[in-house]
């Protein structure tokens, strides 16, 4: 990575206890104004964010190991992105691409065709959120195949709209009491190497799912398989090698659309532009969001031209979809990712962090698994001597790390996983300090 000029000092500095008085006051105001259903992982209010630090309203400088859930890979205020946003906003903030179109949208579509896996002819449609992208991918697959059923997997997370809640596996907090859910969603077993029976290969795990699909649904009723190449909210589960390729090949043979939900894994996060590349698969449609636009709300589906072009004009879109300011941010963000070679940076983060996590795992008896790819890494916490999930410990670790100035996120079907998603532009020293705090907290809480 070429050197980066940060605007804010890249240091962990605490000037108050956390949360500080100003954050606490905002929490009180928030409770009277913001719906309780919208949670926050860390009750500190951001004032200024750059590179790997979040400066809060009390002047504390925290290490960001979450990137706003894998969004700010280029940082939350990269100067090239900020300039592109300002320049576009001065010209126009909106026209609606479905009314009077603009070049930025077309350029983003051209970039995504070049960046996503597969050398085939592609088309793109832009939206606002990850859930919207996934939902539109399913719309396209159903229309193009004329089939109703959609296959999703255990531990999946695809969003919070009605269709994507149905695709999501975990009840609490995502689905509980929000039903009824969309029909024709069928859940199949995943490959979860840490929790599968020992020795189950990726291909065997895929065959297990395929035989269930064939028996319970029938291949010719299946419009699409929707899968995260590495599961995000479900616990950063990396399927065994061969799992995705076996599913993708079966889908191709049966005319089933293979949709990769790369909302969390995309845009250099896992050490490749897209996680599908690690398994050599070329999804028919890729759903993208999160890291796509330097923090601006934008999402996309890019896929085979013969699928996307089947849809009649007006069938896809949305008032704000592909907003011109978000497109300008995406184009600048992609340029930054290229010029800094952020896929290589993500691999360097893996190389630096994984040995430290493994060392921690060897030193304590509460870590069942260390996994992930690139800068999407996770530690699964268990009760000593068992594989029973320990979500209380994971939550206590995240809370204690925050009080020491490190923002860490949890995830996992069982809530027992600490996930690391640092901005890819984080400096080595700051990252090492953040991982050091995590290790220190684990040792302090389990000693
Ligand atoms: C976050 C996420 C979504 C949903 O994205 P939103 O922008 O929150 O709607 C969908 N799929 C995956 C894999 C995600 O990580």
Image (spheres, rainbow, N blue to C red):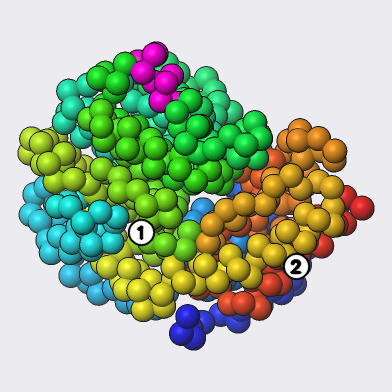
Query: Is 220 left, or right, of 57 in this rendering?
Result: left
Q: Using the rendered image of the protein, determine whether residue 166 is visible from the camera's viewpoint.
A: no
Q: Quadrant of residue 217?
A: top left
**Which sits earlier in the primary sequence, circle 2 or circle 1?**
1
Q: Alpha-carbon distance for marks 2 and 1?
A: 29 Å
Instruction: Decide if ligand 1 comes within 8 Å of the CB at mark 1.
Output: no
Q: For the point 75% across and 72% down, which residue is it?
A: 15
Q: Front-most of 100 and 424?
A: 424
- Mark 1, Cα crowd under 10 Å, few <14 / some 14-19 / many 20+, is many
Give the extent of the magenta segment: 209-217
Q: Main secondary structure of the magenta part?
A: helix
SS for callout 1: helix
Q: Is residue 260 above or below residue 422?
A: above
User: Number of callouts in the render?
Assistant: 2
**x and y percentages locating residue 194 in the rendered image:** 65, 40
Residue wearing tag 1: 292
């Amino acid at each position: 990575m070429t050197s980066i000029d940060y605007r804010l000092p890249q240091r962990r500095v605490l000037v108050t206890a956390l949360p500080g008085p100003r954050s606490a006051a905002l929490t009180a105001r928030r409770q009277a104004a913001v719906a309780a259903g919208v949670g926050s992982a860390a009750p500190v209010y951001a004032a200024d964010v750059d590179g790997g630090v979040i400066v809060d309203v009390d002047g504390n400088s925290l290490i960001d190991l979450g990137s706003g859930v894998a969004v700010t890979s280029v940082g939350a205020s990269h100067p090239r992105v900020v300039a592109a946003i300002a320049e576009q906003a001065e010209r126009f903030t909106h026209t609606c691409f479905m009314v009077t179109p603009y070049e930025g949208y077309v350029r983003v579509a051209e970039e995504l065709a070049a960046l996503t896996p597969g050398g085939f002819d592609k088309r793109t449609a832009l939206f606002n959120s990850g859930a919207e992208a996934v939902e539109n991918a399913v719309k396209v697959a159903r229309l193009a195949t004329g089939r109703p059923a959609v296959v999703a997997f255990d531990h999946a997370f695809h969003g919070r709209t009605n269709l994507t809640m149905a695709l999501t596996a975990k009840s609490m907090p995502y689905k509980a009491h929000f039903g009824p859910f969309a029909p024709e969603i069928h859940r199949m077993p995943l490959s979860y190497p840490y929790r599968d029976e020992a020795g189950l290969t990726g291909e065997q795990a895929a065959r297990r799912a395929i035989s269930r699909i064939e028996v319970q649904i029938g291949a010719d009723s299946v419009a699409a398989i929707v899968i995260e190449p590495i599961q995000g909210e479900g616990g950063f589960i990396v399927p065994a090698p061969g799992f995705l390729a076996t599913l993708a090949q079966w889908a191709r043979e049966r005319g089933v659309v293979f949709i990769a939900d790369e909302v969390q894994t995309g845009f250099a996060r896992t050490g490749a532009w897209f996680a599908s590349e690690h398994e050599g698969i070329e999804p028919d449609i890729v759903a993208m969001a999160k890291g796509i636009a330097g923090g601006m709300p934008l999402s996309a589906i890019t896929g085979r031209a013969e699928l996307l072009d089947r849809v009649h004009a007006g069938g896809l879109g949305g008032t704000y979809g592909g907003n011109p300011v978000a497109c300008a941010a995406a184009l600048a963000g992609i340029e930054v990712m290229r010029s800094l070679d952020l896929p290589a940076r993500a691999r360097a983060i893996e190389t630096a962090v994984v040995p430290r996590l493994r060392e921690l795992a060897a030193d304590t008896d509460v870590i069942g698994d260390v996994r992930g790819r690139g800068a999407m890494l996770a530690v699964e916490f268990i009760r000593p001597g068992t594989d029973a999930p320990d979500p209380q410990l994971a939550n206590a670790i995240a809370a204690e790390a925050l009080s020491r100035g490190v923002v860490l996120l949890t995830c996992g079907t069982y809530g027992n996983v600490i996930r690391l998603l640092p901005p890819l532009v984080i400096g080595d020293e700051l990252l090492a300090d953040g991982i050091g705090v995590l290790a220190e907290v684990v040792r302090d809480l389990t000693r």
